[in-house]
């Protein structure tokens, strides 16, 4: 297995307030125009970093309130106020002062995790707009080897800043142990018209994590305890970024976790290349070294054997250390999120969420009662990138599906280990969702939710189809199974199906098709996250099921549908295919016609409101020249619509 090795660069500002321009300490970083090795990814922004100067800045200046400026992939810098992440307890941090684990936030609400260690600098940024990007060494192995010979605080090193979607991964397969698990109530069978709401994050939970490393794993990071522990700390800091936001759970390494970092592959207590064997070995070893009363969840990193974990074993004496993640190249966010967060997700009670059975999705890995994601899926408990033709994308996105939130939230509510305190953060409140709709097949539609937050947190929304059915291939609609993939949480409460960028380009995203056949009850769930610092809250709610009717033709704009030219003040005809939508049960009697001047991203101008759904309407062209005009016709009082296929001009 081979991972691409991204790069980073960091700029630093010494101003106490968050500055808007990175201009101080220019010696810390520089653009790197040199060619990178063949293993490096092509996308991204390449830079050189003075790690020693960065460390000194963080040690001295950030405690005074100075901001750390981190390079964006497409240029410029985001500037973050930093604090300790809590990944390392004080006792462990005192033993290894060269390892710093931090977290931060900028003025726009973007959140970051930062690690500075013998392995250099690494960071991951969760943008409020759904953008995720990483900054890390161009070549992990070379940097680790160098760190075993001399301090990385000397000289400059190559880094890259790159969007996570552009970081390549390789195949990985996990298995779930057979420990018994009480599944949370399945909300998918809610009665039509009901709005079911689930909440996570009511309490802040700190879980003591005992994380072991085989000698082979440690060898990847210089062969020293400090190097192995630094790699472990980075992984946990990254995983905590997700778990704190989605569950208000933080995993803190046990104070003597260094005793679990092995440096000799010949004498360590693990069979490095056999994940199933290591399940029992880790349970025995962690309990022996740390003591059963001194940890809440245990895990082990290796360089072989894939991933395997017991289901819902946290807090369970005799089972809570049954978790293994093994990769031949255990570095970078594909490892931290796709693999470590995934395997630990099993330990916290989460099942697989993908609906495919091809390639690694087969072999009994699909779990029918939680298979809510089409194809390979794309969230943490799915199998993105390893299901062949049913892959939606190369890597998992760093968030949990609504079903995973439900399952893991239920497990946390049923356990008492760790330290739990009331979360002062107020959970978002979702406004009541709309009543049932009947829509035509093969026609775009949009779902909208709005929520408020008493703390004023910046909210994100994730709409996910919430249907179960037979295993299917991507792009196949059998009338029951999921057909629309999950996308990263975003600031907008509206999801357009298909995704607006695809609709406007007349293309389709892999894993997202419009319903093609009759569906008696197509269900969707919206999850709102507040991302509150120190422990976030999530709230999920279902809309009443949508009925889909296969009509004689899709509801579709037919004119203007090409690059025509209209003149302001003239009368022009807008036409559309009614497609049988006036008849019951859709019963769309009237439509609203709107104009966009920005290529279809917004439609602020009404051309005609509440007019007959007759298929044609003469409208008066408003003033205002544009070469990016589009027309939208939407059923009044319903959620389905269509947009003209091409930009046209208004003189």
Image (spheres, rainbow, N blue to C red):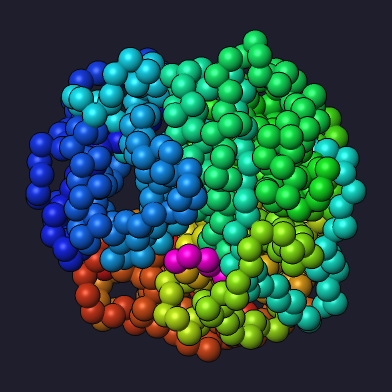
Q: Is residue 351 left or right of residue 48?
A: right
Q: Quadrant of residue 127?
A: bottom left
In the image, the segment drawn in magenta is: 533-538
Q: Would you say residue 534 sits in the magenta stretch?
A: yes
Q: Nearer the viewer, residue 649 or 140?
A: 140
Query: Could you tell me residue 234's position as x and y percent?
Result: 46, 39
- Residue visible at 38% across and 50% down? 102
Determine whether 575 is above or below 221 in the image.
below
**Along the line of sight, the residue nearer the viewer: 417 or 636:** 417
Number of marks in the image?
A: 0
x, y percentage for residue 548?
Answer: 75, 67
Q: Quadrant of the N terminus?
A: top right
Q: Point out residue 238 in the picture as x, y percentages from the top left corner.
A: 49, 46
Examine the rendered structure and indicate whether residue 456 appears above or below residue 76: below
User: What's the magenta bit mostly, secondary-structure-wise?
Assistant: loop
Q: On the image, which quarter does residue 84 sit in?
A: bottom left
Q: For this rendering, which residue is in front, 141 or 71?
A: 141
Residue at left offset 54%, top offset 34%: 258
The residue sitting at the top extreme is 266
Q: Is residue 627 magenta?
A: no
Decide if residue 211 is in sight here.
yes
- Residue 63 is left or right of residue 556, and the answer is left
Residue plotted at (69% across, 26% down):
306
Q: Nearer the viewer, residue 116 or 45?
A: 116
User: Which residue sits at x=57%, y=82%?
Assistant: 429
Q: Is residue 460 visible?
A: no
| Residue 651 % position (x, y) | 21, 68
Based on the displayed image, in which of its 4 quarters is residue 627 positioned? Answer: bottom left
């Amino acid at each position: 297995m081979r991972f691409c090795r991204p790069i980073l660069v960091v700029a630093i500002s010494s101003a106490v307030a968050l500055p808007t321009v990175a201009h101080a300490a220019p010696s810390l970083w520089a653009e790197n125009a040199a060619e990178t090795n063949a293993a490096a990814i092509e996308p991204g922004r390449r830079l050189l970093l003075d790690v020693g100067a960065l460390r000194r800045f963080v040690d001295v200046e950030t405690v005074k309130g100075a901001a750390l400026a981190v390079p964006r992939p497409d240029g410029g810098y985001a500037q973050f106020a930093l604090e300790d992440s809590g990944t390392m307890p004080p006792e462990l941090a005192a033993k290894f002062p060269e390892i710093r684990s931090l977290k931060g936030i900028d003025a726009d609400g973007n959140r970051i995790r930062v690690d500075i260690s013998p392995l250099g600098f690494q960071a991951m940024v969760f943008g409020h707009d759904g953008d995720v990007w990483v900054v890390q060494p161009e070549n992990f192995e070379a940097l680790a080897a160098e760190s075993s010979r001399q301090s990385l605080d000397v000289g400059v090193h190559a880094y890259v800043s790159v969007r996570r979607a552009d970081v390549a991964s390789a195949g990985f397969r996990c298995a779930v142990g057979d420990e018994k698990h009480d599944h949370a109530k399945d909300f998918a069978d809610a009665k039509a018209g009901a709005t079911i709401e689930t909440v996570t994050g009511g309490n802040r939970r700190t879980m003591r994590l005992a994380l072991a490393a085989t000698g082979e794993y440690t060898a990847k990071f210089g062969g020293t305890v400090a190097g192995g522990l630094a790699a472990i700390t980075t992984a946990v800091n990254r995983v905590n970024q997700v778990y704190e936001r989605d569950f208000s759970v933080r995993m803190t390494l046990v104070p003597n976790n260094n005793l679990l970092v092995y440096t000799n592959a010949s004498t360590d207590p693990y069979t490095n290349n056999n994940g199933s064997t290591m399940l029992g070995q880790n349970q025995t070893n962690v309990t022996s070294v740390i003591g059963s009363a001194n940890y809440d969840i245990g895990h082990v990193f290796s360089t072989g054997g894939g991933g395997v974990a017991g289901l819902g074993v946290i807090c369970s004496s005799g089972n809570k250390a049954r978790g293994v993640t093994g990769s031949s190249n255990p570095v970078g966010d594909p490892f931290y999120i796709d693999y470590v967060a995934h395997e630990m997700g099993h330990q916290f009670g989460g099942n697989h969420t993908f609906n495919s059975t091809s390639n690694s999705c087969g072999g009994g890995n699909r779990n029918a009662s939680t298979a809510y994601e089409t194809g390979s899926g794309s969230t943490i408990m799915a199998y993105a990138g390893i299901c062949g033709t049913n892959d939606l994308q190369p890597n998992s996105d760093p968030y949990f599906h609504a079903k995973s939130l439900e399952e893991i939230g239920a497990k946390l509510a049923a356990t008492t280990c760790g330290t739990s305190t009331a979360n002062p953060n107020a959970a978002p409140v979702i406004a009541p969702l709309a009543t049932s709709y009947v829509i035509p097949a093969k026609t775009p539609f949009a779902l909208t939710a709005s929520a408020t937050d008493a703390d004023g947190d910046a909210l994100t929304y994730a709409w996910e189809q919430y249907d179960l059915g037979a295993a299917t291939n991507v792009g196949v609609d059998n009338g029951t199974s999921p057909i629309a993939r999950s996308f990263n949480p975003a600031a907008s409460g509206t999801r357009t199906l298909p995704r607006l960028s695809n609709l406007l380009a007349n293309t389709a995203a892999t894993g997202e098709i419009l319903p093609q056949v009759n569906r008696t009850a197509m269900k969707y769930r919206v999850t709102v996250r507040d991302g509150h610092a120190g422990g976030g809250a999530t709230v999920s709610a279902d809309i009443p099921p949508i009925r889909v009717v296969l009509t004689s033709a899709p509801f579709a704009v037919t004119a203007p549908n090409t690059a025509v030219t209209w003149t302001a003040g003239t009368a022009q005809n807008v036409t559309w295919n009614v497609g049988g939508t006036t008849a019951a049960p859709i019963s769309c009697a009237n439509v609203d016609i709107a104009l966009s001047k920005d290529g279809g991203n917004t439609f602020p101008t009404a051309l005609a409101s509440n007019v007959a759904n007759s298929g044609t309407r003469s409208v008066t062209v408003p003033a205002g020249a544009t070469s990016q005009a589009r027309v939208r016709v939407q059923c009044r009082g319903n959620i389905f619509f269509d947009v003209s296929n091409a930009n046209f001009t208004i003189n």
